[in-house]
Image (cartoon, grey):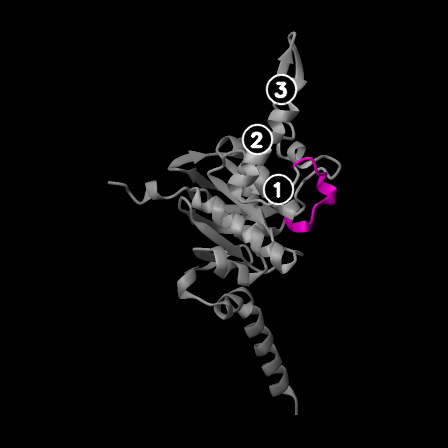
């Protein structure tokens, strides 16, 4: 029989991070099950990006523990996280505009063949495998030889996600994947998130587009000023409640100040 610990793909417990006088993460926890899509939300400065960078190895926490599939891990670089099958797609995508689709997917690990003992880039294999990968994920791009600079924003985002998925991650973190995309492109990216999670990949989705959360997420975690504020199953909440959890404290504080000011006036 599987214990509770064994059901989690990721368990982050008591994570803290301070930059000088600024406490960006204060005793934060995060749990994630296999194939689950978790929406991680909060206002600017809430700590969600820092927490995701801790999990992806880009930021080293001051304290706290990370477990992947029940095993305690310690990441000092994104390479360490990748070795534990954790991938992150950043908002800037990190694509090479002047390189074609296949070249971006295989950047730094291009397939090679040998002729008379001399290694050569195996272009055919690279493009064939790229086509198979795109089709498997439902990414619609007609020609794998197109340069990335000629693709739409949604196609570029799909390539970045496809590249991360090609490393066979068990955890995929996405930072604002639908920002600045047209409606049709947003739907294509959300379909891709569904396809990735359906393959058993656990997904953390960071977004300010709260409506997207209710289309793909199983659960939402809200952060405020470096702390966990609330968790909600997607069927037990609404956009209105999530908005209140994100900014409600600020609105209450402003209202209280305004009321005191009005009361003090003659």
Disc 2 target residue: 129
Instruction: State which quadrant residue 166 falls in.
Output: top right
Crowding at mark 3 (Cα within 10 Å: few <14, some 14-19, many 20+): some
Up/down of 160 relative to 83, above or below: below
Up/down of 215 relative to 57, above or below: below
Crowding at mark 1 (Cα within 10 Å: few <14, some 14-19, many 20+): many
Which mark lies nearer to you, 2 or 1?
Answer: 2
Disc 1 target residue: 160
Disc 3 target residue: 112
Where the C terminus falls, by quadrant?
A: bottom right
Q: CA distance from mark 3 to mark 2?
A: 13 Å
Instruction: State which quadrant residue 125 falls in.
Output: top right
Q: Position of residue 256 (x, y in %)?
A: 57, 78
Crowding at mark 2 (Cα within 10 Å: few <14, some 14-19, many 20+): some
SS class, disc 2: helix
Q: CA distance from mark 2 to mark 1?
A: 16 Å
Instruction: State which quadrant residue 69 falls in.
Output: top left
């Amino acid at each position: 029989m599987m214990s509770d610990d064994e059901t989690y793909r990721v368990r982050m417990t008591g994570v803290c991070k301070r930059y000088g006088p600024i406490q960006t993460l204060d005793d934060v926890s995060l749990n994630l099950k296999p194939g689950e899509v978790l929406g991680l939300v909060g206002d600017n400065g809430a700590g969600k990006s820092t927490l995701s960078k801790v999990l992806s190895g880009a930021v080293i926490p001051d304290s706290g523990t990370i477990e992947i599939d029940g095993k305690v891990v310690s990441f000092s670089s994104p390479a360490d996280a990748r070795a534990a099958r954790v991938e992150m797609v950043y908002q800037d995508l990190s694509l090479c505009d002047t390189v074609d689709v296949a070249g971006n997917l295989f950047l730094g690990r291009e397939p090679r063949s040998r002729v008379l003992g001399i290694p050569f880039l195996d272009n055919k294999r690279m493009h064939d495998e790229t086509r198979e990968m795109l089709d498997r994920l439902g990414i619609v791009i007609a020609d794998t030889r197109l340069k990335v600079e000629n693709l739409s924003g949604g196609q570029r985002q799909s390539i970045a996600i496809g590249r991360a998925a090609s490393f066979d991650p068990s955890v995929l973190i996405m930072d604002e994947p639908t920002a600045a995309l047209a409606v049709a492109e947003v739907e294509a990216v959300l379909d891709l998130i569904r396809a990735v999670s359906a393959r058993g990949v656990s997904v953390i989705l960071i977004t300010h587009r709260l409506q997207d959360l209710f289309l793909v997420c199983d659960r939402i975690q809200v952060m405020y000023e470096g702390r966990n504020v609330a968790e909600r199953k997607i069927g037990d909440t609404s956009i209105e409640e999530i908005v209140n959890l994100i900014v409600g404290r600020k609105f209450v504080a402003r209202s209280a100040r305004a009321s005191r000011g009005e009361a003090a006036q003659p």
